[in-house]
Image (tube, rainbow, N blue to C red):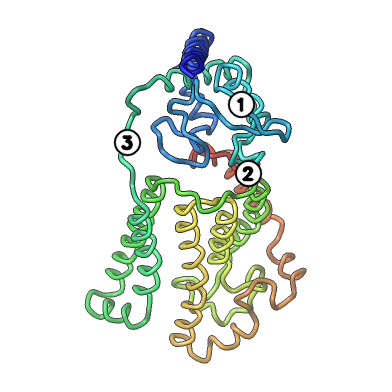
Amino acid sequence: MVAQRLLSFATFSVVLAASSSALADGDPEVGKKLFFERGCAVCHSFDGTAKQGPTLIGIVGKKRQVITSEKPREIIADEEYIRRSVLQPNHDIVQGYVPGAMPGLPITPDEARHLASAIVKLSGSATPEEKPRGSIGALVASTLLFVLGHLVLSSIPVRGIFERRIGVKWFQTIYSILAIASAIWMEMSYRAAPYVELFRAPPWTRWIPLAVMPIALLFFVCSVSTKSPTMAGMEKTVAFEPRGILRITRHPMLWSFALWGFAHIAANGDIASLILFAGITMLAILGMMHIDSRRRVTLGDAWTPFVEKTSLVPFARGNVGKAFAEIGAIRILVSLVVFGAFLHFHKAVIGVSPLP
Protein backbone atom coordinates (compact mmCIF):
# COMPACT_ATOMS: atom_id res chain seq x y z
CA MET A 1 0.00 0.00 0.00
CA VAL A 2 2.79 2.41 0.98
CA ALA A 3 4.73 1.44 -2.11
CA GLN A 4 1.70 2.11 -4.33
CA ARG A 5 1.20 5.55 -2.80
CA LEU A 6 4.87 6.37 -3.23
CA LEU A 7 4.69 5.20 -6.83
CA SER A 8 1.59 7.32 -7.48
CA PHE A 9 3.23 10.35 -5.89
CA ALA A 10 6.39 9.78 -7.89
CA THR A 11 4.38 9.41 -11.10
CA PHE A 12 2.50 12.63 -10.38
CA SER A 13 5.74 14.50 -9.64
CA VAL A 14 7.47 13.19 -12.75
CA VAL A 15 4.52 14.06 -14.99
CA LEU A 16 4.25 17.56 -13.55
CA ALA A 17 7.97 18.18 -13.80
CA ALA A 18 8.19 16.69 -17.28
CA SER A 19 5.23 18.73 -18.48
CA SER A 20 6.67 21.95 -17.13
CA SER A 21 10.07 21.21 -18.60
CA ALA A 22 8.76 20.07 -21.97
CA LEU A 23 6.66 23.17 -22.35
CA ALA A 24 9.36 25.56 -21.24
CA ASP A 25 10.00 26.51 -24.87
CA GLY A 26 6.49 27.98 -25.12
CA ASP A 27 5.80 31.58 -24.12
CA PRO A 28 3.16 31.73 -21.33
CA GLU A 29 2.38 35.40 -22.01
CA VAL A 30 1.77 34.72 -25.69
CA GLY A 31 -0.35 31.74 -24.69
CA LYS A 32 -2.41 33.80 -22.26
CA LYS A 33 -3.03 36.40 -24.97
CA LEU A 34 -4.12 33.66 -27.38
CA PHE A 35 -6.36 32.25 -24.65
CA PHE A 36 -8.48 35.40 -24.79
CA GLU A 37 -8.11 36.19 -28.49
CA ARG A 38 -9.30 32.73 -29.60
CA GLY A 39 -12.32 32.76 -27.29
CA CYS A 40 -11.03 30.09 -24.84
CA ALA A 41 -11.91 32.39 -21.93
CA VAL A 42 -15.61 32.08 -22.79
CA CYS A 43 -15.70 28.45 -21.59
CA HIS A 44 -12.61 28.19 -19.36
CA SER A 45 -11.33 30.46 -16.59
CA PHE A 46 -7.93 31.47 -15.30
CA ASP A 47 -9.31 32.32 -11.85
CA GLY A 48 -11.33 29.28 -10.82
CA THR A 49 -14.66 30.70 -11.98
CA ALA A 50 -17.17 28.04 -13.05
CA LYS A 51 -18.03 28.27 -16.74
CA GLN A 52 -19.23 25.94 -19.49
CA GLY A 53 -15.89 24.15 -19.44
CA PRO A 54 -13.66 23.20 -16.50
CA THR A 55 -11.38 25.81 -14.96
CA LEU A 56 -7.71 25.45 -15.87
CA ILE A 57 -6.46 26.06 -12.34
CA GLY A 58 -4.32 23.08 -11.25
CA ILE A 59 -5.15 20.98 -14.31
CA VAL A 60 -1.60 19.75 -15.06
CA GLY A 61 -0.80 16.45 -13.36
CA LYS A 62 -4.40 15.70 -12.39
CA LYS A 63 -6.21 12.49 -13.27
CA ARG A 64 -9.09 12.98 -15.67
CA GLN A 65 -11.87 10.62 -16.69
CA VAL A 66 -12.34 10.91 -20.45
CA ILE A 67 -14.09 9.18 -23.33
CA THR A 68 -11.76 8.28 -26.20
CA SER A 69 -13.24 6.61 -29.29
CA GLU A 70 -16.43 5.95 -27.29
CA LYS A 71 -14.46 4.12 -24.57
CA PRO A 72 -13.95 5.48 -21.02
CA ARG A 73 -10.42 5.73 -19.69
CA GLU A 74 -8.38 7.57 -17.08
CA ILE A 75 -5.49 9.79 -18.11
CA ILE A 76 -3.16 12.27 -16.45
CA ALA A 77 -3.19 15.78 -17.86
CA ASP A 78 0.31 16.11 -19.29
CA GLU A 79 1.92 17.90 -22.21
CA GLU A 80 0.58 15.51 -24.82
CA TYR A 81 -2.97 15.70 -23.44
CA ILE A 82 -2.98 19.51 -23.31
CA ARG A 83 -1.68 19.94 -26.84
CA ARG A 84 -4.05 17.29 -28.17
CA SER A 85 -7.00 18.94 -26.43
CA VAL A 86 -6.14 22.25 -28.09
CA LEU A 87 -5.54 20.83 -31.56
CA GLN A 88 -8.16 18.02 -31.47
CA PRO A 89 -10.79 19.02 -28.89
CA ASN A 90 -13.00 16.01 -29.61
CA HIS A 91 -10.27 13.38 -29.26
CA ASP A 92 -10.61 12.99 -25.47
CA ILE A 93 -14.02 14.10 -24.16
CA VAL A 94 -14.02 14.77 -20.42
CA GLN A 95 -16.82 12.75 -18.84
CA GLY A 96 -19.89 14.91 -18.27
CA TYR A 97 -19.34 16.93 -21.45
CA VAL A 98 -20.75 16.29 -24.91
CA PRO A 99 -18.70 15.95 -28.12
CA GLY A 100 -18.60 19.23 -30.01
CA ALA A 101 -19.10 21.36 -26.90
CA MET A 102 -15.58 22.70 -27.46
CA PRO A 103 -15.47 24.05 -31.02
CA GLY A 104 -12.45 23.26 -33.15
CA LEU A 105 -10.43 26.41 -33.81
CA PRO A 106 -7.72 27.04 -36.43
CA ILE A 107 -4.80 26.66 -33.99
CA THR A 108 -1.26 26.04 -35.27
CA PRO A 109 1.14 23.70 -33.44
CA ASP A 110 3.20 26.71 -32.30
CA GLU A 111 0.10 28.41 -30.90
CA ALA A 112 -0.86 25.18 -29.13
CA ARG A 113 2.62 25.12 -27.60
CA HIS A 114 2.21 28.67 -26.26
CA LEU A 115 -1.29 27.91 -24.96
CA ALA A 116 -0.08 24.77 -23.21
CA SER A 117 2.80 26.70 -21.65
CA ALA A 118 0.35 29.26 -20.27
CA ILE A 119 -1.83 26.48 -18.83
CA VAL A 120 1.18 24.85 -17.15
CA LYS A 121 2.20 28.15 -15.62
CA LEU A 122 -1.35 28.71 -14.41
CA SER A 123 -1.53 25.20 -13.00
CA GLY A 124 1.37 25.95 -10.69
CA SER A 125 -0.32 29.04 -9.23
CA ALA A 126 -0.91 28.60 -5.50
CA THR A 127 -3.25 31.54 -5.20
CA PRO A 128 -5.58 32.05 -8.16
CA GLU A 129 -6.14 35.61 -9.26
CA GLU A 130 -9.44 36.76 -7.84
CA LYS A 131 -11.73 39.31 -9.37
CA PRO A 132 -14.99 40.72 -8.11
CA ARG A 133 -18.03 38.94 -9.42
CA GLY A 134 -21.65 39.93 -9.66
CA SER A 135 -24.67 37.91 -8.69
CA ILE A 136 -27.76 36.38 -10.24
CA GLY A 137 -29.82 38.60 -7.92
CA ALA A 138 -28.35 41.77 -9.43
CA LEU A 139 -29.12 40.49 -12.92
CA VAL A 140 -32.71 39.66 -11.94
CA ALA A 141 -33.15 43.14 -10.42
CA SER A 142 -31.69 44.96 -13.43
CA THR A 143 -33.74 42.87 -15.88
CA LEU A 144 -36.95 43.52 -13.94
CA LEU A 145 -36.18 47.25 -13.90
CA PHE A 146 -35.52 47.17 -17.65
CA VAL A 147 -38.76 45.31 -18.45
CA LEU A 148 -41.12 46.92 -15.94
CA GLY A 149 -39.60 50.36 -16.42
CA HIS A 150 -40.57 50.31 -20.09
CA LEU A 151 -44.06 48.94 -19.51
CA VAL A 152 -45.04 50.94 -16.42
CA LEU A 153 -43.65 54.33 -17.43
CA SER A 154 -45.21 54.12 -20.89
CA SER A 155 -48.64 53.10 -19.58
CA ILE A 156 -51.35 55.72 -20.11
CA PRO A 157 -52.11 56.43 -16.41
CA VAL A 158 -48.47 56.76 -15.30
CA ARG A 159 -47.34 58.61 -18.40
CA GLY A 160 -50.30 60.99 -18.10
CA ILE A 161 -49.40 61.90 -14.52
CA PHE A 162 -45.78 62.68 -15.37
CA GLU A 163 -46.61 64.60 -18.54
CA ARG A 164 -49.08 66.82 -16.69
CA ARG A 165 -46.56 67.56 -13.94
CA ILE A 166 -43.27 67.96 -15.84
CA GLY A 167 -44.32 68.24 -19.48
CA VAL A 168 -44.01 65.91 -22.46
CA LYS A 169 -40.41 66.76 -23.36
CA TRP A 170 -39.10 66.32 -19.82
CA PHE A 171 -40.94 63.02 -19.49
CA GLN A 172 -39.46 61.73 -22.75
CA THR A 173 -35.98 62.80 -21.60
CA ILE A 174 -36.29 61.10 -18.21
CA TYR A 175 -37.84 58.00 -19.78
CA SER A 176 -34.96 57.71 -22.26
CA ILE A 177 -32.32 58.15 -19.55
CA LEU A 178 -33.92 55.50 -17.33
CA ALA A 179 -34.29 53.09 -20.26
CA ILE A 180 -30.63 53.48 -21.26
CA ALA A 181 -29.40 53.30 -17.66
CA SER A 182 -31.37 50.13 -16.92
CA ALA A 183 -30.11 48.54 -20.15
CA ILE A 184 -26.49 49.34 -19.22
CA TRP A 185 -27.01 47.98 -15.69
CA MET A 186 -28.56 44.81 -17.11
CA GLU A 187 -25.66 44.30 -19.53
CA MET A 188 -23.04 44.88 -16.81
CA SER A 189 -24.87 42.53 -14.43
CA TYR A 190 -25.00 39.86 -17.13
CA ARG A 191 -21.28 40.08 -17.83
CA ALA A 192 -20.46 39.92 -14.10
CA ALA A 193 -22.93 37.16 -13.22
CA PRO A 194 -21.52 33.74 -12.28
CA TYR A 195 -21.91 30.92 -14.78
CA VAL A 196 -24.52 28.51 -13.40
CA GLU A 197 -25.43 25.80 -15.87
CA LEU A 198 -29.13 25.03 -16.15
CA PHE A 199 -28.82 22.65 -19.09
CA ARG A 200 -26.08 21.77 -21.55
CA ALA A 201 -27.07 23.15 -24.94
CA PRO A 202 -26.35 20.56 -27.66
CA PRO A 203 -23.85 21.70 -30.32
CA TRP A 204 -26.57 21.87 -33.01
CA THR A 205 -28.32 24.69 -31.13
CA ARG A 206 -25.51 27.03 -32.22
CA TRP A 207 -27.11 26.95 -35.69
CA ILE A 208 -30.36 28.46 -34.38
CA PRO A 209 -29.07 32.06 -34.06
CA LEU A 210 -27.43 31.75 -37.48
CA ALA A 211 -30.79 30.80 -39.00
CA VAL A 212 -32.95 33.25 -37.04
CA MET A 213 -30.80 36.40 -36.88
CA PRO A 214 -30.96 37.26 -40.63
CA ILE A 215 -34.77 37.36 -40.28
CA ALA A 216 -34.56 39.39 -37.08
CA LEU A 217 -32.21 41.89 -38.71
CA LEU A 218 -34.45 42.20 -41.78
CA PHE A 219 -37.36 43.01 -39.47
CA PHE A 220 -35.23 45.61 -37.68
CA VAL A 221 -33.92 47.27 -40.85
CA CYS A 222 -37.47 47.44 -42.25
CA SER A 223 -38.81 48.84 -38.97
CA VAL A 224 -36.45 51.82 -39.00
CA SER A 225 -37.10 52.53 -42.68
CA THR A 226 -40.90 52.16 -42.73
CA LYS A 227 -43.39 54.62 -41.26
CA SER A 228 -45.72 52.89 -38.82
CA PRO A 229 -48.29 54.11 -36.26
CA THR A 230 -46.89 51.57 -33.79
CA MET A 231 -43.65 53.58 -33.59
CA ALA A 232 -43.32 56.49 -31.17
CA GLY A 233 -44.25 59.83 -32.74
CA MET A 234 -45.74 58.27 -35.90
CA GLU A 235 -49.35 57.89 -34.76
CA LYS A 236 -50.60 60.06 -37.63
CA THR A 237 -49.47 57.46 -40.18
CA VAL A 238 -52.33 55.21 -39.03
CA ALA A 239 -54.30 56.45 -42.06
CA PHE A 240 -51.64 55.21 -44.50
CA GLU A 241 -52.08 51.93 -46.35
CA PRO A 242 -49.82 49.29 -44.72
CA ARG A 243 -46.89 48.46 -46.99
CA GLY A 244 -43.84 46.23 -46.98
CA ILE A 245 -42.97 44.78 -43.60
CA LEU A 246 -46.29 46.00 -42.15
CA ARG A 247 -48.05 43.44 -44.35
CA ILE A 248 -46.09 40.79 -42.42
CA THR A 249 -46.47 42.25 -38.91
CA ARG A 250 -47.36 45.64 -37.47
CA HIS A 251 -44.58 45.26 -34.86
CA PRO A 252 -41.42 44.50 -36.89
CA MET A 253 -38.96 46.11 -34.46
CA LEU A 254 -40.29 44.30 -31.40
CA TRP A 255 -40.35 41.03 -33.32
CA SER A 256 -36.70 41.56 -34.22
CA PHE A 257 -35.85 41.72 -30.50
CA ALA A 258 -38.13 38.79 -29.67
CA LEU A 259 -36.46 36.62 -32.32
CA TRP A 260 -33.01 37.70 -31.16
CA GLY A 261 -33.81 36.81 -27.56
CA PHE A 262 -35.44 33.48 -28.42
CA ALA A 263 -32.57 32.38 -30.66
CA HIS A 264 -30.02 33.06 -27.93
CA ILE A 265 -32.04 31.31 -25.22
CA ALA A 266 -31.88 28.13 -27.29
CA ALA A 267 -28.11 28.34 -27.76
CA ASN A 268 -27.19 29.09 -24.13
CA GLY A 269 -27.82 26.81 -21.18
CA ASP A 270 -26.83 29.00 -18.23
CA ILE A 271 -29.14 30.84 -15.84
CA ALA A 272 -27.70 34.30 -16.55
CA SER A 273 -28.30 33.98 -20.31
CA LEU A 274 -31.81 32.66 -19.69
CA ILE A 275 -32.65 35.67 -17.49
CA LEU A 276 -31.22 38.22 -19.92
CA PHE A 277 -32.65 36.87 -23.16
CA ALA A 278 -35.96 35.81 -21.62
CA GLY A 279 -36.32 39.34 -20.24
CA ILE A 280 -35.71 40.87 -23.66
CA THR A 281 -38.10 38.42 -25.33
CA MET A 282 -40.77 39.02 -22.70
CA LEU A 283 -40.50 42.80 -23.02
CA ALA A 284 -40.82 42.55 -26.80
CA ILE A 285 -43.93 40.35 -26.69
CA LEU A 286 -45.62 42.26 -23.86
CA GLY A 287 -44.63 45.49 -25.59
CA MET A 288 -46.60 44.54 -28.71
CA MET A 289 -49.77 43.96 -26.70
CA HIS A 290 -49.07 47.08 -24.64
CA ILE A 291 -48.76 49.27 -27.75
CA ASP A 292 -51.91 47.80 -29.31
CA SER A 293 -53.85 48.53 -26.12
CA ARG A 294 -52.49 52.08 -25.89
CA ARG A 295 -53.15 52.89 -29.54
CA ARG A 296 -56.70 51.57 -29.19
CA VAL A 297 -57.27 54.25 -26.55
CA THR A 298 -55.30 57.13 -28.05
CA LEU A 299 -56.32 56.66 -31.71
CA GLY A 300 -59.85 55.36 -31.19
CA ASP A 301 -61.75 54.39 -34.35
CA ALA A 302 -58.80 55.33 -36.58
CA TRP A 303 -56.87 52.38 -35.14
CA THR A 304 -59.43 49.72 -36.16
CA PRO A 305 -58.86 49.70 -39.97
CA PHE A 306 -55.09 49.44 -39.46
CA VAL A 307 -55.50 46.46 -37.12
CA GLU A 308 -57.85 44.74 -39.57
CA LYS A 309 -55.30 45.06 -42.39
CA THR A 310 -52.28 43.95 -40.33
CA SER A 311 -51.41 41.27 -37.79
CA LEU A 312 -49.46 40.97 -34.57
CA VAL A 313 -48.19 37.49 -35.47
CA PRO A 314 -45.87 37.53 -38.52
CA PHE A 315 -47.27 36.20 -41.82
CA ALA A 316 -50.76 35.66 -40.38
CA ARG A 317 -52.38 37.91 -43.04
CA GLY A 318 -50.69 36.35 -46.07
CA ASN A 319 -49.63 38.64 -48.94
CA VAL A 320 -46.04 37.52 -48.38
CA GLY A 321 -45.03 37.94 -52.01
CA LYS A 322 -46.42 41.46 -52.19
CA ALA A 323 -44.80 42.32 -48.87
CA PHE A 324 -41.33 41.26 -50.00
CA ALA A 325 -41.76 43.03 -53.33
CA GLU A 326 -42.44 46.27 -51.42
CA ILE A 327 -39.61 45.61 -48.95
CA GLY A 328 -37.25 45.55 -51.92
CA ALA A 329 -33.78 44.20 -52.56
CA ILE A 330 -31.97 47.11 -50.92
CA ARG A 331 -33.38 46.44 -47.44
CA ILE A 332 -32.61 42.73 -47.80
CA LEU A 333 -29.05 43.51 -48.91
CA VAL A 334 -28.54 45.93 -46.00
CA SER A 335 -29.79 43.26 -43.59
CA LEU A 336 -27.32 40.73 -44.96
CA VAL A 337 -24.47 43.24 -44.69
CA VAL A 338 -25.41 43.95 -41.06
CA PHE A 339 -25.59 40.20 -40.41
CA GLY A 340 -22.10 39.79 -41.88
CA ALA A 341 -20.83 42.57 -39.62
CA PHE A 342 -22.40 40.82 -36.62
CA LEU A 343 -20.60 37.60 -37.53
CA HIS A 344 -17.30 39.40 -38.00
CA PHE A 345 -17.32 41.47 -34.80
CA HIS A 346 -19.25 39.11 -32.51
CA LYS A 347 -16.20 37.45 -30.97
CA ALA A 348 -14.33 40.74 -30.52
CA VAL A 349 -17.28 42.46 -28.82
CA ILE A 350 -19.08 39.60 -27.04
CA GLY A 351 -16.10 37.30 -26.52
CA VAL A 352 -17.45 34.19 -28.23
CA SER A 353 -17.57 33.13 -31.87
CA PRO A 354 -21.12 32.87 -33.27
CA LEU A 355 -20.04 30.06 -35.60
CA PRO A 356 -20.60 26.39 -34.64
Residue lying at 54% horizontally and 58% vertically, measured from the top left: 261
Q: Is residue 103 above or below residue 331?
A: above
| Residue at the far bottom in the pictured view | 301
Q: Residues within 10 Å of mark 1 (few under 14, many from 20)?
A: some
Q: Is residue 345 above or below residue 206?
A: above
Counting residues from the start of the chain, the first of labels 2 and 3 encountered is: 3
Residue lying at 59% horizontally and 14% vertically, measured from the top left: 110
Q: Nearer the viewer, residue 161 or 119?
A: 119
Q: Are marks 2 and 1 in contact (CB under 8 Å)?
A: no
**Looking at the picture, which amino acid does disc 1 mark?**
Ser
Counting residues from the start of the chain, the first of labels 2 and 1 encountered is: 1
Q: Is residue 225 above or below residue 5?
A: below
Q: Which mark is residue 85?
A: 1
**Looking at the picture, which amino acid does disc 3 mark?**
Lys
Among the 4 quarters of the image, the one containing residue 251: bottom right
Residue lying at 61% horizontally and 36% vertically, measured from the top left: 102
Counting residues from the start of the chain, the first of labels 3 and 1 encountered is: 1
Q: Residues within 10 Å of mark 2 (few under 14, many from 20)?
A: few
Q: Are marks 2 and 3 in contact (CB under 8 Å)?
A: no
Q: Residues within 10 Å of mark 3 (few under 14, many from 20)?
A: few
Q: Is residue 57 above or below residue 276?
A: above
What distance separates the C-alpha of mark 3 from that of mark 1? 27 Å
| Residue at the far front in the pictured view | 1
- Disc nearest the viewer among 3 and 1: 1
Q: To which residue does mark 2 refer? A: 340
Q: Which mark is residue 131?
A: 3
